[in-house]
Structures are given as C-alpha cells and as structure tokens.
Image: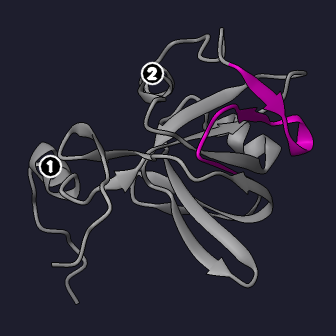
Amino acid sequence: MNTKSPVFDPRDLRNAFGSFATGVTVVTSGHAGSRLVGVTANSFSSVSLEPPIVLWSLGTSSPSLEVFDQTERFVINILSLDQVDLSKRFSSSSPNKFEGVHFTEGLGGLPVLSACVATLECKTTQRLLVGDHILFLGQVEKYCYERKPTLMFCQGSYVQGAEHSPA
C-alpha cells in the first residue's frame, strides 16, 4: 500500500480548497485570569445533533494551541456580515487581539464575542493530530443565534450569500 501523498504546490492546493465557500468564525478560549486567545477559522463544521458535536482545526504551530489544550473548552463565534474587522483582527499575529473588542464571559470564563450571528460554547471531547493541524471536537453546552446576514469567505475574498430563488 502506497501511503505517500502526491506532491502538490501548497499555495495552489489552498486555492482549490478556497473554491468552497465557508462561513467565517472566530474561535476563542482562555479566561481573564490567564490569557485570552482567539483565531479566525473557516474550518468549522457541525458533526452531530445527538449529542450536539462540532469540529474545527488549528495549525500545530499556532501560539494559541497551548491555551486551547489547557482550558479544554472553546467558543465558536460565527461572524455577521458587518464583522470583517474582527475576522481580520483575529487572523493577525497581534498580541492584543481583544483590545477594544466587546465580549462577555461565557461558560468557564471564556470570551463570547458580541453581535455575532451565533455563538456555540463547547467542551472539548476529542483532540486529534491530523497532518499539520489539531482537529478539535467539542460538545455544545450552550448556544444562541439570530437571523442576520452571515460573513462568508470564498476564493480569497469576503462575500455575502444571497437567497436563491427557484426559476
């Protein structure tokens, strides 16, 4: 059995993956007594309703990984169309990502960003090393949402979805 992967240009492969439109999330963890962390991620997906399980992934070289591991909790903050600035802020390497950002304390003291389309407060149930990323699976313990336009990302740009009208 050949387990060796074919050789691909990483940037080109990333462009191919980017053809799939995704919602934009900021995944947060930590608490005020330690260090708050947050990362922009479009690797979020629902997995199960019974029990309610979601997944997301984080690069193994992320400086935030240690906090996600230590707290064993995370919050998926699904961004609204008007939160592009938050997406950009949390995708940066800025040491003070939470400065000036409005959030409340959720379960376990984790930061829950304000004005998001939805927030899912989760307890990590599994952590798997997959390639160059850690896959986090978490059980949703609390959530809230509202109906408003969701921020999306496709082909390297922020986009907005539109309701499809049948022909």
Residue 102 against residue 69 in the figure, above or below: above
- Residue 80 location, x and y as percent? 50, 39
Horizontal side of residue 10 vs 47, given as left or right: left
Residue 8 against residue 76 in the figure, above or below: below
Q: Determine the image quadrant of residue 24.
A: top left
- Residue 148 location, x and y as percent? 52, 47
Q: Report which residue position mark 2 lands on.
A: 85
Residue at image location 48% in from the left, 20% down from the top: 89
Kind of residue at disc 1 = Asn
Circle nearer the viewer, 2 or 1: 2
Residue situated in front as seen by the camera: 80 or 135: 80
Horizontal side of residue 48 vs 69, given as left or right: left
Element under label 2? helix
The magenta stretch is 102-119
Q: Determine the image quadrant of residue 159.
A: top left
Q: Residues within 10 Å of mark 1 (few under 14, many from 20)?
A: some
Residue at image location 10% in from the left, 57% down from the top: 8
Residue at image location 79% in from the left, 50% down from the top: 72
Kind of residue at disc 2 = Asp
Which part of the image, by quadrant, shows the N terminus?
bottom left
Q: Residues within 10 Å of mark 2 (few under 14, many from 20)?
A: few
Element under label 1? helix
Residue situated in front as seen by the camera: 164 or 133: 164
Residue at image location 15% in from the left, 78% down from the top: 167
Residue situated in front as seen by the camera: 73 or 155: 155
Dot label at residue 110: none
Horizontal side of residue 105 vs 55, given as left or right: right
Q: Report which residue position mark 1 lands on.
A: 15
Q: Is residue 117 magenta?
A: yes
Q: Determine the image quadrant of residue 107.
A: top right
Residue projecting furthest to the bottom: 1
Mark toward the start of the polypeptide (2 vs 1)? 1
